[in-house]
Image: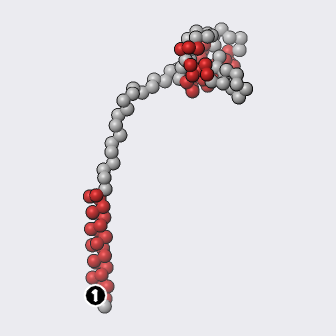
Amino acid sequence: MALLKAVAALFLCLLFLHLTDAYQMVKPPTPTPSPSPLPPIKKIDCGIACGRRCSKTKRPNLCKRACGSCCFRCNCVPEGTSGNYETCPCYYNLKTHNNVRKCP
């Protein structure tokens, strides 16, 4: 009886090993990620860009804080100290909760 249990246990172990080997052979290989066709987006230095944008304002700290948040979201700041929004439509289109333009 003990010999029969030992043979059955050995048979089950060999069957388990055989099935795991078969699974390893059948499992499809994981694909390697393909390189992105687009070049990576270059992040701008928002501190410098907003410093230029807010250089002539009466409230530079408030302007830089708002500009910095807009620059972080849009990754662009229009040239000059005011206007020129056509160069960065995302910057122009950001609004506050009161539907007022957020970016200076």
Q: Quadrant of residue 18?
A: bottom left
Q: Quadrant of residue 77?
A: top right
Residue neighbourhood size for the residue with mark 1, other residues' Cα within 10 Å, grouped as few (<14), some (14–19), many (≥20): few
Q: Quadrant of residue 95?
A: top right
Name, please, the residue furthest toward the right.
98
Render colour scheme: secondary structure
64 on left or right of 10: right
Element type where label 1 sits in the image: helix
Percent across and percent down for residue 84 are: 58, 11
| Residue at position x 35%, y 40% in the image | 33
Is 21 placed above or below 93 here?
A: below
Residue toward you, 98 or 76: 98
Quarter of the rendering occupied by the C terminus: top right
83 on left or right of 33: right
Instruction: Count the numbered circles shown.
Output: 1
Percent across and percent down for residue 49 are: 56, 16
Quarter of the rendering occupied by the N terminus: bottom left
17 on left or right of 36: left
| Residue at position x 30%, y 81% in the image | 8
| Residue at position x 67%, y 15% in the image | 60
Is 83 placed above or below 37 here?
A: above
| Residue at position x 33%, y 45% in the image | 31
Percent across and percent down for residue 83 are: 61, 10
Name, please, the residue furthest toward the bottom.
1
Q: Is residue 15 visible?
A: yes
Is 65 placed above or below 54 here?
A: below
Q: Is residue 65 visible?
A: no
Q: Which residue is mark 1?
A: 3
Name the residue type under label 1: Leu
Residue toward you, 85 or 75: 85
